[in-house]
Image: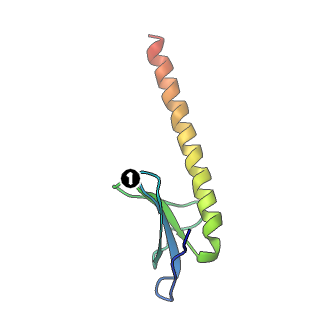
Amino acid sequence: MKRPKTTKDKPYIEFRYSKNGKLHLSATSDWWGGIQESFHCSDGSSGNTCLPKDLDRYIASFNKKKVKEIEKEIQHLQKRLNEIKDK
């Protein structure tokens, strides 16, 4: 994965997963909070920003958090499905 060059005006790297799961990196001046934070866009993409030295750690944390969210959603849907089947 090619890391974008950061500058004094754009010291952070934004990583963004598209709706299809493709990872895009860009330099930015925006900061989205921290390792437990993220953003979600109306186009279905989501991601976070970090300092270049923290990129791998932030991506790993983001992916782990996303897996937990999806697992929780699956459990909820399974419960709803079982409720419908039992009627």
Callout 1 secondary element = loop
Q: Residue lying furthest top in this view?
A: 87
| Above or below, comparing residue 48 to residue 28 in the picture | above
Question: Which of the pair 6/76 is nearer the observer?
Answer: 6
Total number of numbered discs in the rendering = 1
Decide: is 14 above or below 65: below
Residue 87 or 7: which is nearer the viewer?
7
| Residue ranking furthest to the front | 1
What type is the residue that disc 1 sits on?
Answer: Gly
What residue is shown at x 47% (from left), y 24% (from top)? 80
Neighbor class of circle 1 (other Cα within 10 Å; few <14, some 14-19, many 20+) is: few
**Residue 9 image point, x, y percent:** 46, 87
Q: Residue 37's spot in the image, x, y percent?
A: 54, 61
Residue 61 horizontal side relative to residue 73, left or right? right
Vertical relation: 45 (above or below) 1: above
Residue tagged 1:
44
Q: Quadrant of residue 59?
A: bottom right
Please tell me which residue lies in front, 12 or 32.
Answer: 12
- The answer to whether 61 is drawn above or below residue 70 in the figure is below
- Most distant residue in the left direction: 42
Q: Position of residue 69 (x, y in %)?
A: 55, 44
